Amino acid sequence: MHLRELFDKVDRNGNGRLSELELSNALLNDDYSKFRPSTVRLILKLFDKENKNYIDFKEFCRLWNYIGYWRKVFTKFDKEGSQTISFSEYQNALEKIGYRLSTDTILFIFQKFSDGSLQLKFDMFVESLIWLLKITDSFKKYDYQGNGIAVIQFKDYVEEILSFN
């Protein structure tokens, strides 16, 4: 199915834009389950630059390419072909992407986005990486010397944290 066809199919009211609910019908895991609402919401916000609470076709195309990129990464690290990422596969993926985090920190992140099964479906994987990238970008603004130590005033910290939502 071409992107235009998919977009039109999930655009239930035919207004040329996708709401969070409509977008959720287009985003599926490898087992054909829908993405979690929190993942759909986060992805929508990532591509809805004007805070309209919907995306148009052009934004949908960019979103689809972004999802395609992460699907390739996911598939590369799903060594068992289980359509899920185990903790060791997740740890390996983060290391290859360039994150140097302790096992405890990676486990904390993994458990935060897992559904308790000790596996991450594709949507959980994407959501965890989007958050990790957002946190990293925020941290880098205050890591003035590039040494992994951020210096931040409390008011700036509050603004950074609240801007994540």
Image: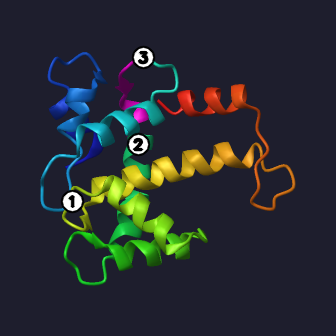
Residue at image coords 38%, 33%? 44
List the residue tagged with mark 3.
Answer: 52
Residue that mark 1 sits on: 116
* Residue position marked by numbered label 2 in the rendering: 63
The magenta segment is 53-60
Compare residues 150 and 60 and report the one nearer the observer: 150
Q: Is 163 on the left-hand or right-hand side of 9?
A: right
Tell me what residue is drawn at x 51 percent, y 20 percent. 50
Q: Secondary structure at mark 1?
A: loop
Q: Residue at position x 33%, y 33% from top? A: 41
Q: Earlier in the sequence, mark 2 or mark 1?
A: 2
Residue 158, x across and y down, in percent: 62, 28
At label 2, which amino acid type do we have?
A: Leu
Local secondary structure at mark 2: helix
Above or below 45: residue 99? below
Residue 80 highlighted magenta (yes or no): no
Badge 3: how crowded within 10 Å, few (<14), some, or many (20+)? few
Left or right of residue 132: residue 42: left
Which is more toward the observer, 108 or 29?
108
Q: Residue 162 is drawn in which quadrant?
A: top right
Q: Amino acid at mark 3?
A: Lys
| Left or right for 138, reference 31 | right
The image position of residue 81, as x and y in percent, is 22, 79
Asked whether residue 55 is drawn in magenta, I would say: yes
Q: Position of residue 69 (x, y in %)?
A: 43, 60
Instruction: Evaluate whether residue 67 shows in this view.
Output: no
